[in-house]
Amino acid sequence: MPFRLLIPLGLLCTLLPLHYGAPGPDGTVPDSAHYRERVKAMFYHAYDSYLENAFPYDELRPLTCDGHDTWGSFSLTLIDALDTLLILGNVSEFQRVVEVLQDNVDFDIDVNASVFETNIRVVGGLLSAHLLSKKAGVEVEAGWPCSGPLLRMAEEAARKLLPAFQTPTGMPYGTVNLLHGVNPGETPVTCTAGIGTFIVEFATLSSLTGDPVFEDVARVALMRLWESRSDIGLVGNHIDVLTGKWVAQDAGIGAGVDSYFEYLVKGAILLQDKKLMAMFLEYNKAIRNYTRFDDWYLWVQMYKGTVSMPVFQSLEAYWPGLQSLIGDIDNAMRTFLNYYTVWKQFGGLPEFYNIPQGYTVDKREGYPLRPELIESAMYLYRATGDPTLLELGRDAVESIEKISKVECGFATIKDLRDHKLDNRMESFFLAETVKYLYLLFDPTNFIHNNGSTFDAVITPYGECILGAGGYIFNTEAHPIDPAALHCCRRLKEEQWEVEDLMREFYSLKRNRSRFRKKRMNSGRWEPPERPGTFSSPENHDQTREKKVGKQKISLLSCPSQPFTSKLALLGQVFLDSS
């Protein structure tokens, strides 16, 4: 089903952003140092405006220069911007904000909060800031990173969300009252992303605190979605968490579904979990078979695969970055270039774009300064070094400053056709958009560490290595250091592995001639053919005990990679063919 974009040349030239004489408009590679400073100035214009006009409210209203609460009255912009401060190099402000948050943020409040948004913004932001505290010069307490005030705040916030998971299916409600739990009249209909976007934060929290409940509920929710997929391998958009029946049956990669797929990949990398990666790869096959047309991705009926909406949503622009994480660079670049043509057409990505018509969809013409296309550019530039990706960064800086900048920050663009503005600056502008722009133009940032430097930290559980790179960004762009998951309380099987290792070591010394090395099976895990065959966390422990009791694998051999990746470099995972 080929589609063509019919864009009048005169209209395109009119809508393309001006460059004000900055480096790059003549086709040369944009000057990274120049744009890095421009991005930093953008951040402080928005951040200072929030502090002066909106704090302690959640978000800034830039047109009226005041603030309002949006997601729960957490001073959300401050939490969301905290790790960006460190990435920009401002350790003194990072330290100050840590103290402000400890003194002012209270989760024991009578507020109805989004389970999804509270997790990705608050829990994710606090966990990231906790793990970056030492690098930011914060005087950490004994036992860090296994303890600390920001970690305790993240745990408190996450515990407020746990009642939402108490459903017959294990899939969470979309909203929870932080003081009273789930309201009696709460709707049981939740979007797919609102169910499957917890494993990164909750598994990190379980690893740091030693309490498995967070990772357990996140895994159950992921598995229930997997079991609910259609016979052709697709998931819908909204599901009833009480009955497990699909309410909205549109399947795609965009709004309502997006971060479920993202967290299968990032959860697999973070946890080195081959099952999560295999699940994504199976979904990826179905997505290619039924939703991809000429490197665009459409919306289809989840049971039949017939096209239901031939539109591109701005939230889908994360997909090329996700493809880069599994090494699918060629497909990622082709899709990215499609999306970039839309940016060039309007100076931003409209929320909905009709692909056959090559224009915006009615009442979906706005651009709330979303980060997804910039995010993909950052990932792909790390993987390829293609200067086209820097050009997108340049265009984003120029467009946002030209269209969106106002006296008190940056305003949501209500309509990209006439550049009308809306009175809101979402916290993700500082958490994601500015951060990904800065990292695109800052190749030596500590986030891009390739393992050449690291910090050795002594914890109550031994020495661990932090800051070596490979950071996993949650869907709100809060970086999680994967090494931190190995610093704190060990799961039972890890303790048993250490004990087996020591026994084998001494057995080897006593009787080398009888020692016979056995290789671990590194075969690719195949997901079950049909739903309903995954074990639950309740019987997982029993299964694990049986397996451990029979274990005869030499733990002195080098561990095999849990999926087909052979090299993790600069935060990218490259497959064998790369």
Image (tube, helix red, strand yellow):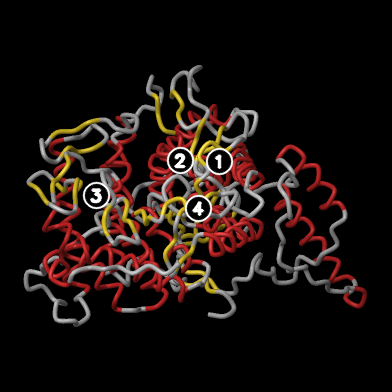
Please report whichever mark, 1 or 3, sits nearer to the chain's N-terminal start.
Answer: 1
Amino acid type at mark 1: Thr
Residue at 47 percent across and 57 percent down: it is 481
Question: What distance separates the C-alpha of mark 1 from that of mark 4?
Answer: 41 Å
Dot 1 and dot 4 residues touching (CB under 8 Å): no
Name the side, left or right, on which 399 lies relative to 524.
left
In this rendering, which labeled residue sits more in front, label 1 or label 4? 4
In this orientation, which residue lies closer to the viewer: 539 or 551? 539
**Residue 561, located in which quarter of the rendered image?**
bottom right
Q: Residues within 10 Å of mark 3 (few under 14, many from 20)?
A: many
Dot 2 and dot 1 residues touching (CB under 8 Å): yes
Please report whichever mark, 2 or 1, sits nearer to the chain's N-terminal start.
Answer: 2
Question: What distance separates the C-alpha of mark 2 from that of mark 1?
Answer: 8 Å
In this rendering, which labeled residue sits more in front, label 3 or label 2? 3
Question: What distance separates the C-alpha of mark 2 from that of mark 4?
Answer: 41 Å
In the picture, the disc for residue 151 is 2
| SS for callout 1 | helix
Can I make out residue 143 in this image?
no
Q: Residues within 10 Å of mark 2 (few under 14, many from 20)?
A: many
Seen as rendered, the residue at the extreme right is 514
Q: Residues within 10 Å of mark 1 (few under 14, many from 20)?
A: some
* Residue that label 3 marks: 365
Q: Residues within 10 Å of mark 4 (few under 14, many from 20)?
A: many
Residue at 17 percent across and 68 percent down: it is 12
In this rendering, which labeled residue sits more in front, label 2 or label 4? 4
* Residue that label 1 marks: 209
* Residue that label 4 marks: 300
Question: What distance separates the C-alpha of mark 4 from that of mark 3?
Answer: 22 Å
Amino acid type at mark 3: Glu
Residue 491 locus on image (x, y percent): 67, 47
Query: Is the residue 458 above or below the residue 57 in the image?
Result: below
Dot 1 and dot 3 residues touching (CB under 8 Å): no
